[in-house]
Image (cartoon, rainbow, N blue to C red):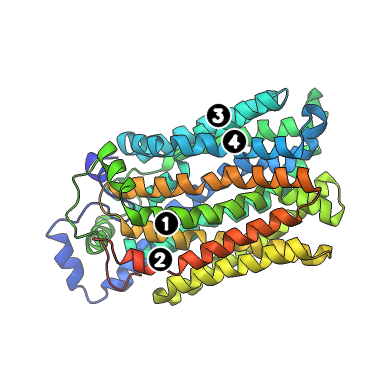
């Protein structure tokens, strides 16, 4: 990544030259041409980023399906399982901003594959854990290794996509999460059936094979990811000029390009709006990761199934979430001025779903409720589009990293809390009620997002 690109935020790649922008602006079919170029960009870079996200969420959540099979060998209680699940996010949160600063220093083409290869190796080594303590250490190290990947890809997308089309790009990228959770549940359940092959247990095969997948994808990413639009061999000269002009149009007009590194971090942390975004994301992730890590065991308890069957059934809510994400993304694209209201309604649907799952005694209704709760995935790209649009210059990547870091504290607190409540009460009812409350509070706060966005010096009327 060139130094010039390193100083741009997720929605503000470098300006076009003066000769290119007027030519583009004057073109009568500029909008159609821009849409064609952006669509081409998305077709090229979204597949590899989605595959990376796919592997990322498989490796961080495979313990949710493999956990019951690990119980006998490692002696895991619900509290131990919840803590081990959540410790991933301790390392993740602590190293999120440093990793993003390193990304800006070394460039996405080098740093993102480095992240993938490192976490793949650590995931594979998790097959060697002998008890709770070693599992805690490996989960902590996995979080440290993966820190920076998700917001790093958001930053990378912002180098290629104009700000007003970032919600579309984020939504396409976000599809990788529910798809990975759906297919990952099936894959992990299938790998558990390899128990005893070559003297290796099924849960050990899960970590070995899925960790290896991350290493392979990381190497592929390094080989094919361009560092910037100017380095993309699949864009011709005209397409590059169209894209640069679109970026110039949507970039911030604040003139605030002086903050870099630690200065950008301190500036962002003093900003009240970024903490508003962080709080909403924290409440969303509190519920999301509790469902993610406990879903197979909740299904196993409520539907009275075996471990492999529970893993397979866990794919259903995430398949529904994938469909919801596609629907919400398309609906938002057709109703660009209703982004805040769409986010609020989506969060309310998740609230209702978790209430149903917690209060019903009917297994089918419980599964329906969990499906609605899993639709939280449809809300995430909507929320991310606000801080991505809000913060100009070098502060953009730091803002995304901070929101992701603070939000992912919910990834530690949610699974651990649900585990303790299950240990203490013998059921998931009270824990699921707490999760529904977190979605409800997020919905209430989301109503004020548009007002927060308009306080940004980079605010562009008509893009909210």
- The answer to the question of whether label 4 and label 1 lie on touching residues, with beta carbons closer than 8 A, is no
Image quarter (top left, top right, bottom left or bottom right) of the C terminus:
bottom left
In which image quadrant can residue 193 be found?
top right
Q: Which element carries disc 2, helix, strand or loop?
A: helix
Q: Which residue is mark 3?
A: 141
Q: Residue at x 40, y 74 (%)?
A: 336
Kindly identify which residue carries mark 2.
449
Query: Secondary structure beneath disc 3?
Result: helix
- Quadrant of the rendered image containing residue 79: top right
Please name the residue that numbered disc 1 is placed on: 277
Foreground disc of the pair 3, 2: 2
Q: Distance from label 2 to label 4 (Cα)? A: 30 Å
Callout 1 touching callout 2 (CB < 8 Å): yes
- Work out how far the residue at label 3 is from the one at label 4, CA to CA, in angstroms: 9 Å
**Residue 67 left/right relative to 333:** right
**C-beta proximity under 8 Å, tags 1 and 3:** no
Q: Residue shown at 71%/43% (left/top)?
A: 420
Which residue is located at x 22 percent, y 61 percent?
245
Upstream in the sequence, badge 3 or badge 4? Answer: 4
Q: Is residue 248 above or below residue 4?
A: below
């Amino acid at each position: 990544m060139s130094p010039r690109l390193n100083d741009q935020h997720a929605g503000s790649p470098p300006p076009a030259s003066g000769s290119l922008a007027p030519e583009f602006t004057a073109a009568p079919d500029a909008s159609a041409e821009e849409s064609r170029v952006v669509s081409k960009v998305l077709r090229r870079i979204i597949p590899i980023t989605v595959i990376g996200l796919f592997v990322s969420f498989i490796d961080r959540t495979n313990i949710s399906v493999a956990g019951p099979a690990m119980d006998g060998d490692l002696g895991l209680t619900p509290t131990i399982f919840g803590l081990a699940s959540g410790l991933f996010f301790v390392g993740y949160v602590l190293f999120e901003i440093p990793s993003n600063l390193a990304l800006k220093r070394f460039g996405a083409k080098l740093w993102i594959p480095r992240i993938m290869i490192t976490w793949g190796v650590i995931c594979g080594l998790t097959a060697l854990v002998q008890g709770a303590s070693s599992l805690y250490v490996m989960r902590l190290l996995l979080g440290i290794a993966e820190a920076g990947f998700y917001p790093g890809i958001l930053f990378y997308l912002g180098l290629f996509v104009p700000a007003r089309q970032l919600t579309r790009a984020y939504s396409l990228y976000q599809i990788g999460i529910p798809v990975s959770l759906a297919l990952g549940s099936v894959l992990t359940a299938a790998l558990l059936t390899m128990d005893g092959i070559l003297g290796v247990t099924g849960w050990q095969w899960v970590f070995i094979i899925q960790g290896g997948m991350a290493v392979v994808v990381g190497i592929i990413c390094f080989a094919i990811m361009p560092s910037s639009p100017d380095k993309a061999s699949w864009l011709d000269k005209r397409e590059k000029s169209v894209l640069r002009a679109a970026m110039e149009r949507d970039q911030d007009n604040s003139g605030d390009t002086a903050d870099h590194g630690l200065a950008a971090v301190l500036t962002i942390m003093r900003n009240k709006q970024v903490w508003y975004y962080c709080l909403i994301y924290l409440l969303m992730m509190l519920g999301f990761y509790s469902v993610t890590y406990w879903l197979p065991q909740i299904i196993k308890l409520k539907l009275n199934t075996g471990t492999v069957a529970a893993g397979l059934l866990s794919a259903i809510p995430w398949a529904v979430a994938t469909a919801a994400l596609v629907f919400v993304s398309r609906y938002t694209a057709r109703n660009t001025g209703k982004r805040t209201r769409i986010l609020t309604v989506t969060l309310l649907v998740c609230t209702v779903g978790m209430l149903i799952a917690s209060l019903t005694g009917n297994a089918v209704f419980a599964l329906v409720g969990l499906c609605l709760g899993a639709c939280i995935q449809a809300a995430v790209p909507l929320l991310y589009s606000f801080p991505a649009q809000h913060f100009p210059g070098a502060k953009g990547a730091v803002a995304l990293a901070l929101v992701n870091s603070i939000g992912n504290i919910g990834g530690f607190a949610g699974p651990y809390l649900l585990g303790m409540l299950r240990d203490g009460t013998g059921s998931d009812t009270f824990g699921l009620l707490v999760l529904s409350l977190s979605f409800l509070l997020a919905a209430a706060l989301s109503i004020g997002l548009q007002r927060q966005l308009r306080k940004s010096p980079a605010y562009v009327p008509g893009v909210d």
